[in-house]
Amino acid sequence: MSSNRVRVLRKQQRLSLEALAERAGVTKSYLSKVERGLSDPSISTALKLANALGVEVGRLFSDEEDPELVTVVRADERTPIAAGAGPGAPHYEGIATGLSGKQMVPFVMYPPPAGVDTPFKSHGGEEFLFVHAGTAELELADRTVALGPGDSVYFNSALPHRCHSTGAEPAQILVVIHDDPADSDGRVPPLP
């Protein structure tokens, strides 16, 4: 059994060590030993763990790459999401949209040009922006940050923020939002 596989599946489902142990009918200390590779579970315990995680027992033992643990999205496979209406409106392309249980929400943003009035957004969690191409400005309540290719910014998403392209072409920005389970109601946070 892959001890790391159990830990990854547990975290993917946002379960604490204690919650999974309770679901599987094992002690928290024993489950911790299984996850650290210090103890090998019996077949009956492996079946209980698989059942508690809602997966086939084979997923706990397989050395093959698990498509639900690793997702590759090619540039032409991004999912169009939340496209704004009209010229100059922002649009977004989702990355790994089919992967459930993730704690990060990655997407590519093409912000509207400067001068287009867009509302400030805020939401729980944290946010990371990386400018892949073009130039942009990230506006926060107390400052504006100019960004160029290769620049990045990491901030608390509760701060009101909005972004605009500042060049002739829309900027291409990789955005990763960490959706904190403690603050989440299970919905995807609003796009910036």
Image (cartoon, rainbow, N blue to C red):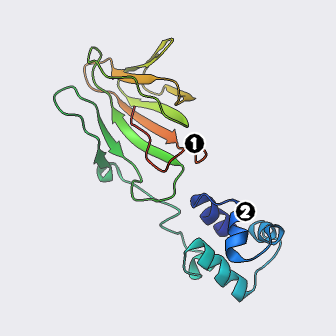
Q: Nearer the viewer, residue 132 or 7?
A: 7
Give amino acid for label 1.
Asp
Label 2, residues with CA under 10 Å away: few <14, some 14-19, many ≥20: some
Report whether 100 appears left or right of 112: right
* Name of the residue lying farthest toward the front: 185
Residue 183 tag number: 1
**Above or below: residue 29 compared with residue 16:** below
Residue 17 tag number: 2
Residue at 36 percent across and 53 percent down: it is 74
- Marks 1,2: beta carbons within 8 A: no
**Above or below: residue 191 compared with residue 7:** above
Quarter of the image for the N terminus: give it.
bottom right
Q: Nearer the viewer, residue 117 or 185?
A: 185
Q: Considering only order in the chain, which callout, 2 or 1, is on the residue closer to the N terminus? A: 2
Q: Nearer the viewer, mark 1 or mark 2?
A: 1
Q: Secondary structure at mark 2?
A: helix
Q: Nearer the viewer, residue 185 or 47?
A: 185
Residue at 59 percent across and 82 percent down: it is 57
Residue 172 image offset from top left, x and y in percent = 35, 32
Residue 34 tag number: none
User: What's the CA distance linking mark 1 and mark 2?
Assistant: 19 Å
Residue at 72 percent across and 70 percent down: it is 22
Label 1, residues with CA under 10 Å away: few <14, some 14-19, many ≥20: few
- Name the quadrant containing residue 178: top right
Report whether 55 appears left or right of 122: right
Residue 183 visible in rendering? yes
Report whether 182 appears left or right of 105: right
Give amino acid for label 2.
Leu
**Above or below: residue 18 compared with residue 39:** above
